[in-house]
């Protein structure tokens, strides 16, 4: 949760506190009601000013941000994996390359580990989503332990 969300939650809680205070105040005493309302409004304004000061305006952020010149970059296709044989990835979280050039890609969306040869041709699925042997339920990262083991 970032700082912006914390302040939004604080403002919502402040509004809830306002409603509770209004219920607890003796409504027969108008001076007390006016004093409580002015205090709540004062603290609300302070909270808004603090939020604006911390987050600043978008114009200030634009002035302070750096833009890298990427006009001189040259893009080129180095290799294709899986596109030739009709295999489509869901969302690759990471990939590892073994010593013999085999690529193992972790597909986070499909929850599968896919194996490709050094030419990018899909060899097969090493593990897929499930609860049985050779199946996985989730993963965060894969590591190549040796030529035949992935964890």
Image: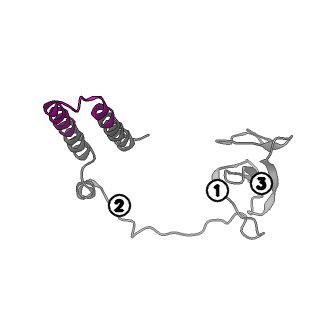
Rendered residue at 24%/44% (across/down): 48
Residue 68 is tagged as 2
* Residue 34 falls within the magenta-colored stretch: yes
In this view, the mark in front (1 or 3): 1
Figure quadrant of the C terminus: top right
In this view, the mark in front (2 or 1): 1
Mark 2 falls on what kind of element? loop
For residue 27, which quarter of the picture? Answer: top left
Mark 3 falls on what kind of element? strand
Mark 1 falls on what kind of element? loop
Upstream in sequence: badge 1 or badge 3: 1
Q: Position of residue 83 (x, y in %)?
A: 71, 68
102 and 82: which one is in front? 82
Residue position marked by numbered label 3 in the rendering:
115
Figure quadrant of the N terminus: top left
Q: Position of residue 17 (x, y in %)?
A: 32, 34
* Residue 58 falls within the magenta-colored stretch: no
Label 2 environment density (alpha carbons within 10 Å; few <14, some 14–19, many ≥20): few
Label 1 environment density (alpha carbons within 10 Å; few <14, some 14–19, many ≥20): few
Upstream in sequence: badge 3 or badge 2: 2
Q: Position of residue 149 (x, y in %)?
A: 78, 40
Residue 47 is tagged as none
Magenta range is: 19-42
């Amino acid at each position: 949760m970032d700082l912006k969300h914390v302040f939004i939650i604080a403002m919502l809680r402040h509004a809830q506190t306002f409603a509770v205070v209004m219920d607890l105040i003796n409504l027969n005493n108008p001076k007390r009601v006016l004093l409580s309302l002015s205090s709540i409004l004062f603290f609300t304004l302070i909270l808004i000013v603090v939020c604006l000061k911390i987050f600043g305006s978008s114009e200030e952020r634009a002035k302070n941000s750096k833009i890298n010149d990427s006009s001189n970059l040259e893009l080129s296709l180095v290799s294709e994996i899986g596109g030739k044989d009709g295999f489509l990835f869901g969302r690759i979280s990471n990939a590892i390359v073994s010593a013999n050039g085999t690529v193992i890609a972790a597909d986070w969306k499909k929850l599968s580990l896919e194996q490709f040869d050094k030419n990018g041709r899909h060899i097969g699925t090493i593990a897929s989503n499930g609860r049985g042997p050779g199946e996985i339920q989730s993963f965060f990262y894969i590591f190549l332990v040796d030529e035949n083991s992935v964890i």
